[in-house]
Image (cartoon, rainbow, N blue to C red):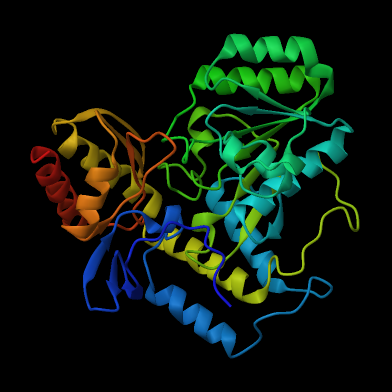
Amino acid sequence: MNLFNVYPLFNINPVKAQGSFLWDDKGQKYLDFYGGHAVISIGHNHPHYQTQLKNQLDKISFYSNSVQNELQTELADKLGKLSDLEDYNLFLCNSGAEANENALKLASFHNGKSKVLYFSGSFHGRTSAAVSVTDNPKIVAPVNYDERFIKSKWNNIEQLETVFENQGSEISSVIIEGIQGVGGIMIPTVEFLTKIKELCEKYGAVLILDEVQSGYGRSGYFFAHQEFGIEADIITTAKGMGNGFPIGGVLIHPKFQASNGLLGTTFGGNHLACVAAIAVLDVMKDENLIENAQEMGEYIENEMKDFPHIKTIRRKGLMIGIELDRDCSEVRNSLLYNHHIFTGNSNDKAVLRILPALNIKKEETDLFIGALKTVLENL
């Protein structure tokens, strides 16, 4: 049997990782400035993370959600405290797409409406409803397309108001990323988010903040939208939540009522996943990683802002988009193959996406900054 060939792969096979570095099967060392799409939040193989997972393997690794699991309670308690959302409730699942599916479903259960408003440039996942609110026709199969999903322009208040005026009574929810990741690190304005919140309240729609990539300290706030003082009805999270262990979560405002069977999952919130997520929160708190994301992000931007071929830098914390005056693929490939540094791209071909671990150190950022300067000066 062969693998189903859907991924364009770099000819690199990592076999070892530690902190912000990877090693391939030939012994070559790489600086990881992408974290596998913002998944590696506390660095590869953090000692506390490793210890907690190994200890849990000696106890129990899985049982279904038909029994008590005190690790889920501990995770919810610590997440509530660190995010300052202690009044919210937590539903645990396995991925960002699954979190968004459950958020959309819960919103529709709540108000009995079926239409969903999403925005240009968005990416919310590849599963059924999640891909229907993702702005990429290439990955939306005919079975996923439905006129109930309405697209509006990013940061365009006028069109937003028009959509609500025409269809507001039918809109169940509005889903928006705290910061668009795949879209090219696009940051919503406070005016745009405020207007969305206002219209949701006016028309009885649910505001869903997708913080799958922009959450968990990535932006320099626990969730990116918290910078603007916006209260979301539902928040979805995943990626950095488990530092590589598959886990997702739906944070649910207390106005939503739970009932038996309303939502469900086989693997979500299993013992190993919870231990991984608890370890991440412990490290984030003990090592002040949200503050480090703010400081290191500002340092990186200041050091590279005058480099040639950079048109703009879009950044919150350590979620960084470097817009070049050309397709970024040549720069990305040179960083990878000549300087051995992993970076990312986006749907905007000119944007180089930077998503290092939140505990990145200054000397490691200097390796990236120096390499980027060399590559850009030699274009």
Q: Nearer the viewer, residue 115 or 6?
A: 6
Q: In this view, does 348 lie to the left or right of 299?
A: right
State whether residue 61 is above or below residue 373. below
Rendered location of residue 143, percent (x, y): 76, 43
Q: Which of 358 and 328 is in front in this view?
A: 328
Q: Which residue is drawn at 78% across and 17% down?
A: 168
Q: Quadrant of residue 73?
A: bottom right
State whether residue 268 is above or below residue 16. above
Q: In which quarter of the image is residue 94?
A: bottom right
Quarter of the picture containing the N terminus is bottom right
State whether residue 252 is above or below residue 46. above
Q: Which of 331 and 370 is in front in this view?
A: 331
Q: Nearer the viewer, residue 163 or 52?
A: 163
Q: Is residue 10 left or right of residue 244?
A: left
Rendered location of residue 219, percent (x, y): 42, 41
Q: Residue at x 9, y 38 (%)?
A: 377
